[in-house]
Image (spheres, rainbow, N blue to C red):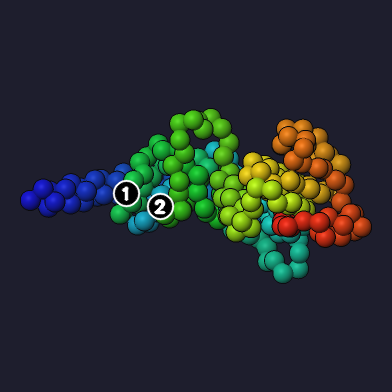
Amino acid sequence: MLLVLSAAKQNRVSIKRAALARAVPGYAGAISAPRQIEIKRVEFRAPAAGEVRVRIEGCGVCASNLELWLGKPWFKYPVEPGAPGHEAWGQVDAIGDGVAGLDVGDRVAMLSSHAFAEYDFAQSSDVVRLPATLDGEPFPAEPLGCAVNIFKRANIRRGETVAIVGVGFLGILMTQLATNAGARVFALSHRRSSLKHAPSLAPRRRLRFTISNRRCNASVRLRTDVVVTA
């Protein structure tokens, strides 16, 4: 009997959520041609079953976005408003039917595809609630998740020598993960500006920052247990 009542209560909550969810107006960035972006007024629909709608606080720019921006020949324009933003975080604004474990107002990070906008949608399974300790902090969880996934697949262990080729956002995360695991790290970058990050990443005995070139890259690869191209 208690289970029946619980299910009925959940159904009423689901119906109430669906009734409260309405389309909302807002704005989204739209890449209309190579190196051109327009701000479009968009109506953001109510979330479908299993979805949440999130009011976006911020969205990272992935390196994969740059080829679209530059106009590589395999892309077609204009691009849908909000695309290809996929490193977003924000607050749940509306909840679709059948979603459990999330509430309106929850601050979340998510996997989505049109987040260069005021709102975007994600399956509830692709949304992670952020802890209160991160309140007010920008949190592009997608690239952070990529870094942890790479780290686990590489199986980096204490005492190993690791080369991180490329010291952008992902490379910096990989450098921190590898040094924290007790590995000795060679971090290679074409950009001298990356050197300024070195003192804050790890104890000097575990980290060597090097300006990348062909001879240096070949030498480091011969002396390492793991090579990560970031």
Q: How many other residues sit within 10 Å of disc 1, few (<14), some (14-19) or many (≥20)?
A: few
The image quarter containing residue 182 is top right
- At label 1, the amino acid type is Ala
Q: Is residue 221 left or right of residue 9?
A: right
Tell me how far mark 1 sits from mark 2, CA to CA.
8 Å
| Residue under pointer 1 | 100
Q: Position of residue 179 (x, y in %)?
A: 68, 43
| Towards the viewer: 68 or 131 | 131
**SS type, badge 2:** helix
| Residue under pointer 2 | 124
| Residue ID at (76%, 61%) | 71
Q: Position of residue 229 (x, y in %)?
A: 74, 57
Q: Is residue 77 above or below residue 38?
A: below
Kindly tell me whether residue 19 is visible in this rendering: no
| Towards the viewer: 220 or 22 | 220
The image quarter containing residue 67 is bottom right
Q: Quadrant of the C terminus?
A: bottom right
